Amino acid sequence: MEYVPGIPILKPSLDADNRPFWEAVRRHEFVLQKCGSCDRYFQPPRPMCPECRSMDTMEWVPSAGRGQVYSFVNFTTDRMAYPAMKIPYSVVLVELEEGVRMISNMLDLEPDDVQIGMPVEVAFDDLDEDLTLFKFKKLEG
Amino acid sequence: MLSEYLERRYRPERRPSPEANLVRDNTAIVGIGQTEFSRNSGRDELDMACEAIKNAVADAGLAIEDIDGLEAFTLERTSMPAIVSALGIPNLRFTSEISFGGGASGANVLHAAAAVATGVANHVVCYRSLNEASGHRYGRGDGYVGYLSEAPTLHYGYYFPFGFLTPLAWAGMYAKRWMHEYGIDPDQLGWYSVVLRENALRNPKAVFNDRPMTHADYLESPMIVEPLRLFDCCVDTDGAVALVITSAERAKDLKQTPAYILAAAQSCPPEQEIQTSYNRPVMSGLPETWYMGQELFRVAGVGPADIDVAQLYDPFSFGALLQLEELGFCERGESAAFCEGGDRIRPDGQLPLNTSGGLLSEAYIHGYNLIAEGVRQIRGTSTSQVEGAELVLATGGPGVPTSGLILRR
């Protein structure tokens, strides 16, 4: 996908729960939130475990960022699209091996070539001095 | 454990008995009022809200002095005190506002009815006024440029940076997965939109009253966010609707045939987000609508087969199809086939739907116009009247914490 110069991307809003995730992305690291007691992953991050209801077992663990495309949409006209992205572009929902699903874009892949079930791996896209986003690349083989 | 609730476990034993529910059969919608529905009202939202409320109060045979409660969306841009001042409401003693956009339509009625049933207020008005077509368009992405520099909520911070920031796209993500899991043929879609347009052609107040649409027209309409087309989308509208709720006892002496509230319910199951609940085990469904429906049918003591006509909140045709499955009107994955050809959902069909044209073809007043149409069906005054309609189901917005009603003649 390509960006239209001069139109700012809407940045993530940060709080105590998601700040570690976005700081890791800035360092090109991909981490997920997990309850150390239940061994379950959660997205979006939260201050406590909704399963065992412990308030001190949530931790950030490294992830290989591998998974597959669970669903996707293609923006084929500028209606409903965000003007910073060149049309057409796709948005994918990736189901990671850890079980959680995350929204992102595909790098180096045309919208017509996106398919449900396609294996993908995380990649990092430095947009400017203040913003790095995680994206996905098709995993060959 | 939380995880068992993710698998849709409705636990009646943990809920109050239907007999303990004071709203049930003890409250009624007794007045409905609206403004013109248009694409450019040329008025402000306060002006329209006042007209709709005046009309609803007059429709009920009441006076402004009788109104002692007001109910609205948190999204409502008119100020409640400004409404009180403009209409000259002297006796207001109950107000509340509910979040989650269109999910609040039935909830407004529930809270009004709860206030009435517990003796906190006598006559509560619910209202929604918006210049969605000529003013701020909630459903557009370009409105954010220069207006916000970051996502407006924490959850949206995981979506907006990727150019994923409009309700049609959020719904499309569900639609794509649903079509994949159930092998839906895209040509099967569209009949819902066609039937609603037929209903709108009979309704002189509908925005699309003069614009016929065939199934071929639907298939030729442009893809907006693949897999959803232009004719899958609701009609952005300027307008206002108001409803008056009072007790069943007082309703007997008023001007209109009461639409008794047999059940009203809200739901917000785990892992709920605002239209982006993508971390639930199954994504080809709407658990919030399922839980809400379970509660409605249990409290009302009726089942899906007893419903004479349904008014489903349809920001997109696909959202209504999934609700047909979640409310038990058809099997999972079969809603497109259920609507194919349109006969089952026309006014003389097995389950007539959105008889005023719905949000797709009458007006997008965030579900309030659907409830008003439900009341007209109970009164026998719809322009697409279902013969002998006694039980009407109306839903609030899908994909958000939602709500709904069953009305009885």
Image (spheres, coloured by chain):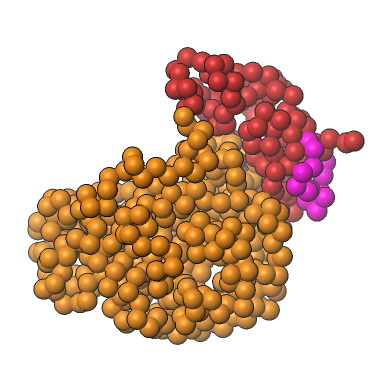
Chain colours: A red, B orange
Quick one: A59 or B326, which is closer to the camera? B326
Q: Which residues are magenta?
A: A107-120
Q: Is residue B311 magenta?
A: no
Q: Main secondary structure of the magenta part?
A: loop
Q: For this view, does B78 lie left or right of residue A131?
A: left
Q: Is residue A112 magenta?
A: yes
Residue at horizontal 79%, vertical 48%? A114
Question: Which quadrant does the N terminus of chain A fall into?
Answer: top right
Q: For this view, does B226 lie left or right of residue B67?
A: right
Q: Is residue B153 above or below residue B188?
A: above
Quick one: B116 or A44, which is closer to the camera? B116
Residue at horizontal 70%, vertical 23%? A63
The picture places residue B378, in percent across and down from the top left corner, at 31, 75
Q: For this view, does B285 lie left or right of residue A99?
A: left
Question: Which quadrant does the C terminus of chain A fall into?
Answer: top right
The picture places residue B213, in percent across and down from the top left corner, at 59, 80
Q: For this view, does A41 lie left or right of residue B50?
A: right
Residue B209 visible here: no
Seen from this angle, which residue lies furthest right?
A141
The number of discs equals 0
Residue B170 visible here: yes
Residue at horizontal 55%, vertical 32%? A44
The picture places residue B128, in percent across and down from the top left corner, at 33, 61
Quick one: B310 or B213, which is closer to the camera? B310
The picture places residue A72, in percent across and down from the top left corner, at 69, 48
